[in-house]
Image (cartoon, rainbow, N blue to C red):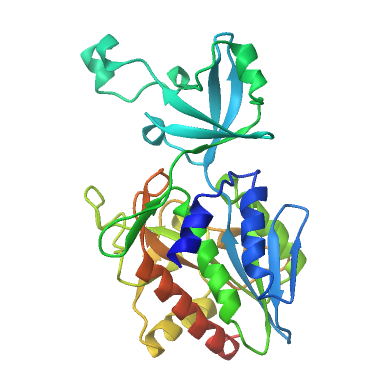
């Protein structure tokens, strides 16, 4: 599982540019599904089984990142954000610019602290002052490398193991969910249909989940994502009580109700499954953010939809941290949820 997680997180797939990660996932699932296709939005849809009901599992495969906005005459590259990238996460990072000819290495630069006054040194830099340096002498040399306006940019990071079963990497959000979806598909063996969607453009508006759900017309749906772990310094209990190693998060409310309000029958299905099978779980009520579930729930005349999450530290950074046993526990929980679903719908 760790090797596949490493491969998934180290494969680029910024929102709108998911082709590389889609092909990696396709290779993993094509021998475990009855059909695998890419739809018009770029979602990868793997279907297995048949019956009177269809359960849709959505795990978004896109990640936050950057895109080339401008190349100045001196060969420095200005960029725009794609998704929820923070200024803190940009400072002093190495990056990969994904061109049609391959990856070009660069670094995000800023004015040295030696040239700043005390106030500037202790504050975040203005985003407009940041730039990418690939070592080119001028604009023409940048263009000769194949870099173009609109090329996507990811952080240059690899997965590393920490102590006590923790792993760190970029793009854990949501390659962790993709890994759970892949494993769930492999183990599915019920008398109804499972459609696992590795969705696009979640980080910029939950777009792929909405269109794929319209095409699939599921009877029940479940988003599998990551959730904000609160077991690190600086996070208050009223912001997150989730702990790594303490079980899957089962979402109750997202974004004060502007996101998903989990239907009662879905809530009963998930909570009963956890309690009846001895799975630890953590209920989640979130004032900000939403998962693919929020859009799936509203497709056509409505779809009973839930959302579960694997606790994640350092979300939306280049150094996200997950406990591998939490991923394994989520896969086990889903297997039991598959078996009990027909009792509720």
Say if 283 sits above or below 115 in the image. below
Question: Residue 44 in the image: x percent, y percent?
Answer: 69, 60
Residue 85 x/y as whole percent: 46, 38
Image-based side of 34 in relation to 152, left or right? right
Q: Is residue 240 above or below residue 113?
A: below
Report the residue at 40% width, 32% height from top.
93
Residue 283, given in percent of the width and then of the height, sits at 37, 70
Quarter of the image where one finds residue 310 = bottom left
Q: Quick check: 230 left or right of 74?
A: left
Across the whole image, how many numbered discs are drawn on residues?
A: 0
Q: Quadrant of the C terminus?
A: bottom right
Q: Residue at x 56, y 81 (%)?
A: 187
Residue 132 seen from this side: yes
Is 59 left, or right, of 125 in this rendering? right
Q: Is residue 176 visible?
A: no
Q: In the image, what residue occupies the spot 66% across and 30% down?
A: 150
Q: Toward which corner of the image does residue 15 lie, by quadrant?
A: top right
Q: Which image quarter: residue 195?
A: bottom right
In the figure, 220 relative to 207: above or below?
below
Q: Position of residue 135 (x, y in %)?
A: 50, 18
Residue beneath the point at 58% across and 43% down: 14
């Amino acid at each position: 599982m760790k090797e596949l997680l490493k491969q998934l997180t180290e494969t680029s797939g910024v929102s709108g540019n998911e082709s590389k990660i889609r092909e990696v996932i396709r290779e993993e699932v094509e021998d475990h599904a009855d059909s695998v296709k890419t739809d018009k939005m770029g979602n990868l849809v793997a279907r297995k089984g048949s019956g009177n009901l269809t359960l849709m599992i959505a795990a978004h495969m896109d990640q936050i990142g950057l895109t080339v906005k401008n190349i100045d005459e001196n060969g420095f590259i200005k960029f725009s954000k794609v998704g929820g990238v923070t200024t803190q996460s940009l400072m002093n990072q190495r990056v990969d610019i994904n061109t049609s000819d391959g990856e070009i290495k660069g670094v995000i630069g800023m004015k040295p602290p030696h040239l700043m006054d005390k106030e500037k040194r202790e504050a975040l830099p203005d985003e407009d002052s940041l730039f990418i340096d690939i070592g080119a002498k001028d604009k023409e040399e940048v263009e000769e490398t194949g870099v173009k306006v609109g090329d996507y940019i990811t952080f240059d990071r690899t997965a590393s193991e920490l102590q006590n079963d923790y792993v760190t990497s970029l793009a854990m959000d949501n390659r962790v969910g993709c890994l759970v979806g892949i494993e769930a598909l492999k183990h599915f063996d019920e008398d109804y249909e499972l459609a696992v969607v590795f969705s696009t453009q979640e980080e910029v508006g939950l777009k792929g989940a909405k269109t794929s759900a319209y095409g699939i017309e599921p009877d029940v749906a479940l988003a599998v994502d990551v959730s904000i772990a609160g077991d690190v310094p600086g996070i208050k209990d009223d912001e997150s009580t989730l702990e790594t190693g303490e079980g899957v998060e089962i979402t109750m409310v997202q974004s004060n109700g502007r996101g998903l309000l989990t239907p009662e029958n879905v809530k009963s299905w998930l909570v009963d499954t956890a309690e009846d099978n001895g799975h630890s779980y953590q209920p989640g009520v979130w004032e900000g953010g939403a998962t693919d579930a929020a859009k799936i729930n509203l497709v056509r005349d409505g779809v009973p939809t839930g959302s579960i999450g694997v606790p994640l530290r350092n979300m939306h950074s280049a150094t996200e941290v997950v406990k591998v046993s939490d991923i394994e526990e989520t896969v086990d929980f889903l297997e039991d949820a598959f078996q009990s679903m027909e009792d509720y719908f």
